[in-house]
Amino acid sequence: MEVKVLDFNGKDTGRKVQLSDSVFAIEPNNHAVYLDVKQYLANQRQGTHKAKERAEVTGSTRKIKKQKGTGTARAGSIKNPLFKGGGTIFGPRPRSYSFKLNKGLKRLARKSAFSIKAKESNVIVLEDFNFETPNTKNFINVLKALGLENKKSLFVLGESNKNVYLSSRNLKASNVVTSSELSTYAILNANNLVLLEGSLELIEENLSK
């Protein structure tokens, strides 16, 4: 599919680029997308939750009352989970929520995400640009020129650009990544995908392996 190339002022440069059909025009695999997004979100979980069990609670281990004749249930320790301040029964323990996915499935998920955005006409190709110094106002002007100031956007760079990244860092609705940092979640979480020309070849190269 052909897409026109815009400059950072939002004007048509008169050039067009051909987006690979094998990346931007496949039949999306929803299950692959689901698994990749699930893995991404699972990896964000720290898994450091912990509750003290009976053996870890501070307290005496003596039998707190006689076994029979009290008219109440027998109790052997103040650390009994039924008492206030006692241990927690089957409480959470530190664990990792991560799980493995095959590289081929992850590539299919990213290609599906790209195809979904392309089908919705939410892909913009922008010529490569840079700022002399980090400047949030300049980045906001780029967003306004593209009509994205009130939308979630994901800018994909071909290579790391410190000035562009720092200029966007204070803006919650905009995210700047390199082609190697792309994730299915980031693609789908943005309303609009802004691909800089320098990133196109790298994206297609990474996803065609």
Image (cartoon, rainbow, N blue to C red):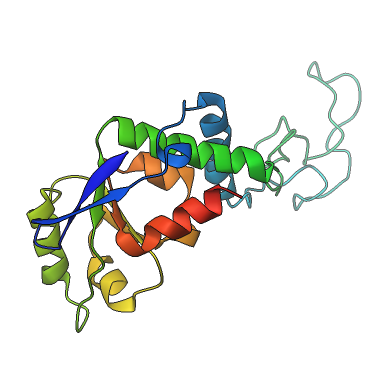
Q: Quadrant of residue 91?
A: top right
Q: Would you say 192 lies left or right of 78 here? A: left
Looking at the picture, tell me which residue is in the foreground, 78 or 195. Answer: 195
- Coordinates of residue 160 in the picture (x, y in percent): 40, 72
Above or below, comparing residue 169 to residue 34 in the picture: below
Q: Quadrant of residue 164?
A: bottom left
Q: Residue at x 22, y 79 (%)?
A: 134
Q: Report how many numbered discs are placed on residues in the image.
A: 0
Q: Would you say 169 lies left or right of 109 here? A: left
- Coordinates of residue 60 in the picture (x, y in percent): 82, 49
Q: Would you say 55 lies left or right of 184 here? A: right
- Coordinates of residue 83 in the picture (x, y in percent): 70, 33
Which residue, as the protein is rendered here, is positioned at the far right? Answer: 67
Q: Residue at x 35, y 64 (%)?
A: 198
Above or below, comparing residue 3 to residue 14 in the picture: above
Q: Residue at x 32, y 38 (%)?
A: 1
Asked if residue 173 can be seen in this view, the reply is no
